[in-house]
C-alpha cells in the first residue's frame, strides 16, 4: 500500500519539475554536443585573420548559443584629452574582468532566448559582459564601460547580439566565427549552450589554441626576453625603411625633374 501511494506522488513531482523547465531540454535526455574544425590557429607574418567553424547536435526544441571567449583579465587603456591644438594622453584607466575576445552566435538574438538576469548568471550577452567588468577610475564607470565595449566591438573583438547559428535535420546545428587578425595569442574556449524556457539546460566546451609561429614567434620571444635588443632592432628597421623610401621617391623625383624641361622644349 505504501508503494502504491508513493507512485502518484513521484509522478506529480516529475510533472511539476518538467513544467517548471528544469532538467535537460528534451524528453530523451539528450544534451548538446560540439565539434570545432580548428583546435589550433597559427599566426604567421602574413596572417590576416581566419575562420572557425563549429557544429554539433542539440534537441530540436532548444535554442543554441555559442560563446567564443578567453579567460577574463585586466587591460589598461590610455585616456586622450585635447591640450591646445593637439590630442594627448592625459591619463590611464584600468578595466578588470575583460576577456580578450568575446563573440556569440545563436539561433535567435540572445535577448530573445535569455532574460537579463540569466545572461548575467551564465556570462552570455551584453548583461553577461557588463556583470563582470570593473573600472579602476574616479570617472563615470557606466560611461567608461560603455565606451570600452564599443571600442572592442568596433575592433571586431567583441560581439554579443548573437545570430548566425543554422539548424538542420536530426537536431544538427552549425555556425562560423570570423577570427580577427589582431586578436592576441593564447587559449580560448568555445562553449555551446542548449537553451529552453529562458534558461540554460546543458552545455559542451572545446579549447582553441592561438599561437604565433615562424618569424612572428621569434619577434615575440625577442620582445619578451630581450627588450633592449628588440628596441634597438626596431629602430634600425625603421631607419632602414626610411632610407629605402627616400631612395625610391628621391630617385623618382629627380627623374621627373630632368624629364620636365625636355617635355617643355618639345
Image (spheres, grey):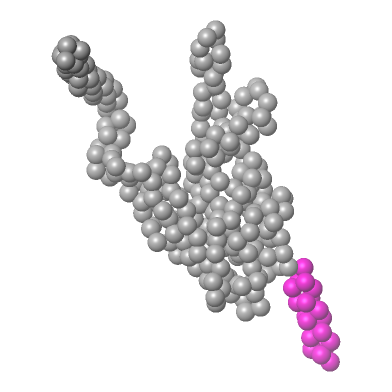
Q: Residue at x 33, y 44 (%)?
A: 47
Q: Residue at x 39, y 50 (%)?
A: 50
Q: Is residue 167 above or below residue 242?
A: below
Examine the residues drawn in magenta and state their main secondary structure. helix
Q: Residue 264 falls in which quadrant of the image?
A: top left
Find residue 233 and report its horizontal and vertical position in percent: 23, 24
Q: Is residue 245 above or below residue 145?
A: above
Q: Quick one: 69 or 81, which is closer to the camera?
A: 81
Q: Is residue 236 visible?
A: no
**Membership of 98 in magenta stretch:** no
Magenta part of the chain = 1-20
Find residue 143 and report its horizontal and vertical position in percent: 66, 29
Q: Residue 214 falls in which quadrant of the image?
A: top left
Q: Is residue 127 left or right of residue 10?
A: left
Q: Is residue 22 left or right of residue 208?
A: right
**Membership of 16 in magenta stretch:** yes
Amino acid at each position: 500500500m505504501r508503494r502504491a501511494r508513493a507512485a502518484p506522488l513521484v509522478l506529480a513531482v516529475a510533472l511539476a519539475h518538467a513544467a517548471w523547465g528544469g532538467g535537460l531540454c528534451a524528453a530523451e535526455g539528450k544534451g548538446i554536443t560540439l565539434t570545432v574544425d580548428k583546435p589550433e590557429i597559427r599566426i604567421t607574418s602574413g596572417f590576416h585573420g581566419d575562420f572557425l567553424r563549429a557544429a554539433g547536435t542539440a534537441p530540436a526544441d532548444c535554442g543554441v548559443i555559442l560563446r567564443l571567449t578567453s579567460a577574463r583579465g585586466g587591460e589598461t587603456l590610455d585616456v586622450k584629452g585635447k591640450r591646445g591644438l593637439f590630442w594627448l594622453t592625459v591619463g590611464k584607466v584600468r578595466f578588470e574582468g575583460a576577456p580578450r575576445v568575446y563573440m556569440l552566435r545563436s539561433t535567435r538574438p540572445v535577448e530573445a532566448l535569455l532574460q537579463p538576469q540569466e545572461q548575467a548568471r551564465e556570462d552570455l550577452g551584453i548583461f553577461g559582459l557588463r556583470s563582470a567588468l570593473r573600472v579602476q577610475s574616479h570617472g563615470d564607470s557606466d560611461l567608461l564601460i560603455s565606451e570600452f565595449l564599443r571600442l572592442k566591438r568596433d575592433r571586431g573583438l567583441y560581439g554579443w547580439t548573437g545570430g548566425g547559428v543554422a539548424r538542420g535535420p536530426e537536431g544538427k546545428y552549425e555556425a562560423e566565427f570570423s577570427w580577427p587578425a589582431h586578436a592576441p595569442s593564447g587559449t580560448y574556449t568555445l562553449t555551446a549552450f542548449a537553451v529552453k524556457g529562458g534558461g540554460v539546460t546543458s552545455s559542451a566546451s572545446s579549447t582553441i589554441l592561438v599561437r604565433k609561429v615562424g618569424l612572428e614567434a621569434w619577434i615575440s620571444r625577442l620582445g619578451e626576453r630581450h627588450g633592449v635588443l628588440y628596441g634597438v632592432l626596431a629602430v634600425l628597421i625603421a631607419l632602414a625603411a626610411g632610407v629605402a623610401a627616400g631612395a625610391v621617391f628621391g630617385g623618382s623625383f629627380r627623374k621627373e625633374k630632368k624629364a620636365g624641361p625636355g617635355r617643355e622644349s618639345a
